[in-house]
Amino acid sequence: QVQLVESGGGLVQAGDSLRISCTASGRPFINHVLAWFRQAPGKEREFVAAITWSGGSTYNVDSAKGRFTISRDNVKNTVYLQMNSLTPEDTAVYYCAVRWGGWMSHRDRDYDYWGQGTQVTVSS
């Protein structure tokens, strides 16, 4: 059974930085993609960033805007999202997702498993 557990969310002020994590377990994590999505209140879930097993990455230019960095630790089966210069518009529940055997899709329906999400709230 695949499990994705996010952590590190919280309440921060505008301009602050925050790093959230997602640890995966339950299946050999090879030839796969780990991604971050987010969903703000009243909005659809949107892609933020994704990273492959070998470290290739892609970003949603609009939401990441050069402020976010995705990285991973393959020994720990953990993916990170470093978020800098946060604004209230970044307030959302951030979800980790995984897919096997595909490319770094920006579509949530292409991912096989999801975590429960971690809340990030940025105050002005």
Image: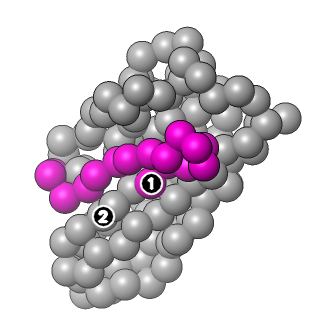
Outermost residue to the left: 66
Based on the picture, tell me whether residue 52 belongs to the magenta stretch. Answer: no
Task: Please indicate, yes or no, whether residue 117 appears anywhere in the rendered image.
Answer: no
Start and end of the magenta stretch? Answer: 65-80
Residue 82 is situated, as x and y percent measured from the top left of the image, at 34, 61
Q: Which residue matches tag 1? A: 80
Q: Secondary structure at mark 2?
A: strand
Quadrant including the N terminus: top right
Residue 65 is situated, as x and y percent measured from the top left of the image, at 15, 51
Q: Using the image, determine if residue 20 lies above or below residue 13.
A: above
Crowdedness of circle 1 by 10 Å Cα count: few (<14), some, many (20+)?
many
Q: Which residue matches tag 2? A: 83
Residue 105 is situated, as x and y percent measured from the top left of the image, at 41, 23
Looking at the rendered structure, the kind of residue marked 1 is Tyr
Residue at image position (42%, 16%) is 103
Q: Residue 72 vs residue 31: left or right?
A: left
